[in-house]
Image (cartoon, rainbow, N blue to C red):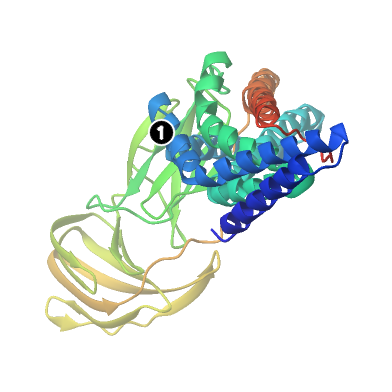
Amino acid sequence: MEMLPLAYALALLTYSLGALLYGSPIPVRSVKRWGVAMMYDGLASAVLVSTYSLLLRLGEYLLGVLGASWPSFIAWLTGRTATLVTVYLALQSLAATLKLSGADVLLELLKHVGNLVAASLTAIKMIYLISMIVYSLRDKILALGVLLYAIPLRVGKGVGAAMVALSLIYYVGLPLMPAFALAFESPQLSTAGDRYGSISGSVVDVLGGSIPYPIVSLYRGSRDPVATIVGDAEGEFYFGPPQDLIPLGEEFEVEVVFMGYRLRPDPASVVVPWSGVLRIGNALYAGGGLALMMVGVLELRASNLSLGSVELEINTLSPEATLILLKLKSVQVSEAVVNGERVGCAWSSFSWRGLEIEECYVSLKAGESFVSISYSGDGYPRPDAEERHYVDVGDVVDYLNALLTAAVSYLYSYLLLPSAYLAILSASSYALSRFLGGGLRLRVL
């Protein structure tokens, strides 16, 4: 680095000035001591410049001996940050749910929990910032420390020694923080307790294909849903802690809404805890923003699906049935054929959850029908639906107490322990800087 030749030149200058003072005929004792000190400083600075590369490799060697590494340390920090972010977002969701439920009294306790989690998250972010500075700028910090150390008259010796010590101690010490925390922290407490369960699974069509972004609602003795969420692109959904507080043993009726149609899945009701597949027996999602709804007593005997083409063999068991073609407005259906005859669809459009949807009704007679559809489409976006989470207000106080206990545990493990470890590293750096002949303050001999 460019700073090292300058540091070496300053070291030679310091040594030469010290030799000049030491050999001068000035009969003053303090001048001789100044000369000896400057000669020592020059030699020490030259040694630091010469061992610069060795000091960099020494850190890597010590990490290897101690079984630590920076990638694993960064992964540990990232995992803890993700945990706190998830908990914090869940608390925000729970606060919104409590506010809608009218439980404003409990929001104050939840606010204290959120403050503890936020403080822990701030501490982790600060540690992450310090770690990134040390990891990415260690060589520059070390070189700058050597340069300051080599300035004559010990003008920057204290700061230089401190920077050299920090670059060594923090580079080796920070990756050991996970081991230090593991030795002193207690196991993380569960915030869900033993009284709450979850409802999770996936929504599929009649052929077992995923239905993207289904709106899943839970009902319990009312026409209004007690909870509503939007599944993901693969049809996966989840009700449960920390956003939903659903007591074990509760039974709910389930409804799925897709492309504006209310659909009854199989099973139609679930008991907490439950995990499985909700099958929609009268819907088929072809992909690319095209779906088919079947009304009547129908039996799907054969199918051939590919993006842009649908071929179905349907057996109508009732006197008549209806096949509803549903598509996004951007989807283009080039041809729809039933039993060899082209169907002229009179598309009607409607708006639903921010989506423009068109539908066409095709009548099917009793017996076998062969349906072929050719189309082009890009995909199905997430509908603009408001989610609603379930909270049993009667038991929420116990749950908030459990959250508060967990938040205190986070504060201890994520704030106090790392702060204590950083204090240990700082004390070790100060001791090393004093050993190198400096300190943490500027001074002139």
241 sits to left or right of 391: left
Residue 385, position in %: x, y? 56, 56
Residue 427, position in %: x, y? 69, 25
Residue nearer the viewer, 182 or 240: 182
Residue nearer the viewer, 184 or 153: 153
Q: Is residue 42 visible?
A: yes
Residue 249, position in %: x, y? 47, 20
416 sits to left or right of 307: right
Q: Secondary structure at mark 1?
A: helix
Amino acid under disc 1: Tyr
Q: Is residue 266 above or below residue 258?
A: above
Q: Residue at x 70, y 48 (%)?
A: 14
At label 1, counting other C-alpha atoms closer than 10 Å, the crowd grade (few under 14, some 14-19, many 20 or more) is: few
Q: Is residue 214 above or below residue 366?
A: above
Q: Residue at x 57, y 50 (%)?
A: 137
Dividing the picture into quadrants, the one containing residue 298 is bottom left
Q: Is residue 310 above or below residue 418?
A: below
Residue nearer the viewer, 207 or 120: 120
Residue 31, position in %: x, y? 84, 38
Q: Residue at x 33, y 75 (%)?
A: 377
Quarter the C terminus occupies: top right
Q: Is residue 92 visible?
A: no
- Figure disc tally: 1
Q: Is residue 385 above or below residue 236?
A: below
Residue nearer the viewer, 1 or 202: 1
* Farthest-out residue, right: 28
298 sits to left or right of 180: left
* Farthest-out residue, front: 25
Q: Which residue is mark 1?
A: 61
Q: Residue at x 46, y 39 (%)?
A: 70
